[in-house]
Amino acid sequence: EEVMKAADHIIDIGPEAGTHGGELVFSGTYDEIIKDDKSLTGRYLSGREEIAIPTTRRKWNDHIDIKGARENNLQHANATFPLGVLTVVTGVSGSGKTSLVKRILAPALQKTLGNYSGEQTGSYDSIEGDYNKIEQVELVDQNPIGRSSRSNPVTYVKAWDEIRNLFASQPAAKAAGLKPSAFSFNVEGGRCDVCQGEGEVKIEMQFMADIFLTCEACNGNRFKQPVLDVLYNEKNVAEVLHLTIDEALEFFAKEAKIIAKIKPLVDVGLGYVQLGQSSNTLSGGEAQRIKLASFLVKGNNTHKTMFIFDEPTTGLHFADIKKLLKSFDALLDNGNTIIVI
């Protein structure tokens, strides 16, 4: 916001994200954009739209204390982290925020809880407090989702299992003897044997960067023809994977189990992302919000968890931050703790 106020010229792209964006909404000065009703950015800058400040703050009693933190730039710092509320750790770049939270608090608490990940812990004197109020620590970072490029939003939130079952229940699938596994691009059976369900093949270029070409065997559809012949609501599985999450909400409107798993992706502001979008095409911020959505899917099954988010608002628009804060509220309402760096 401060950079936009200081800018000599502002170009606003939108009006929203994904298929709902891509247009030049505004081009001009700061004084002009704040008067432009077509610009969502302008409406936030002018105060006509806003991220509401809570009128009341959550109360807390339980806490975790770090004593004598002295990793990197930290100089025997003592810090109290409240439980059951949203805590922000702030400071200028290089002040020790990451050292305190990611190098000391997270691994030290994991050791205490018995689910240590093996990461080396920074130097500190002691960790004290109400351990019994925390069951696990989740560091929600911006690393890619899943273990490979096969991972995508719909598989990460476990919605693809329900979609596979839905397709396998169609009359055409039953007639062809297709089980739910045939609609998986991760195992042999229904997926294309040439590209192994990737929809593209890699061409190694030796001393140059590899290139990826659309698979000629399946035309990029990932699956064998008998699988593609099965339709639900006039679409096959390949076409479903190309739906945006917003489109999928409408497409699967009658399928409560599927909606329950993909709606959190919209709640965190990712409605423009495709269901089958490869993890290696997602930004760090998008990957982080998909991870957040996966915890929202679990709902009441996730509680007494300390979530640590590293700069979750980086690159986000005001409207995206508003959605993110609502998602944080949902986690807190389930009895979790959130720490934001």
Image (cartoon, rainbow, N blue to C red):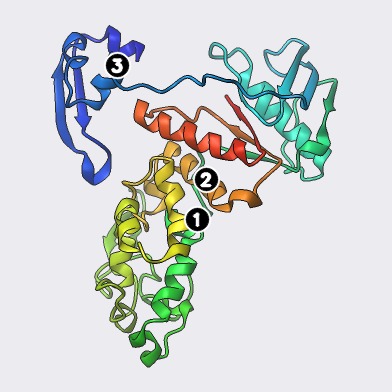
Q: Which mark is first along the chain, 1 or 2? A: 1
Q: Nearer the viewer, residue 254 or 204?
A: 254
Between residues 188 and 311, which one lies in front from this camera angle? 311
Q: Position of residue 322 (x, y in %)?
A: 41, 30
Answer few, some or many: residues within 10 Å of disc 1's Cα (few below 14, many 20 plus, some between 14 and 19).
Answer: some
Q: Name the residue under label 2.
A: 291
Q: Is mark 2 on a helix, strand or loop?
A: helix
Instruction: Please state if 309 lies on the left or on the right of 18 as rendered.
Output: right
Q: Which quadrant would the C terminus be assigned to in this image? A: top right
Q: Where is residue 236 in the image (x, y as percent from the top left)?
A: 29, 73
Q: Are marks 2 and 1 in contact (CB under 8 Å)?
A: yes
Cα distance in 3D space between marks 3 and 1? 35 Å
Give the image location of residue 257, x and y in percent: 48, 64
Is the N terminus in the top left, top right, bottom left or bottom right quadrant?
Answer: top left
Q: What element carries label 3?
A: helix
**Relative to 77, 228 lies left or right:** left
Q: Neighbour class for label 3 at 10 Å: few (<14), some, many (≥20)?
A: many
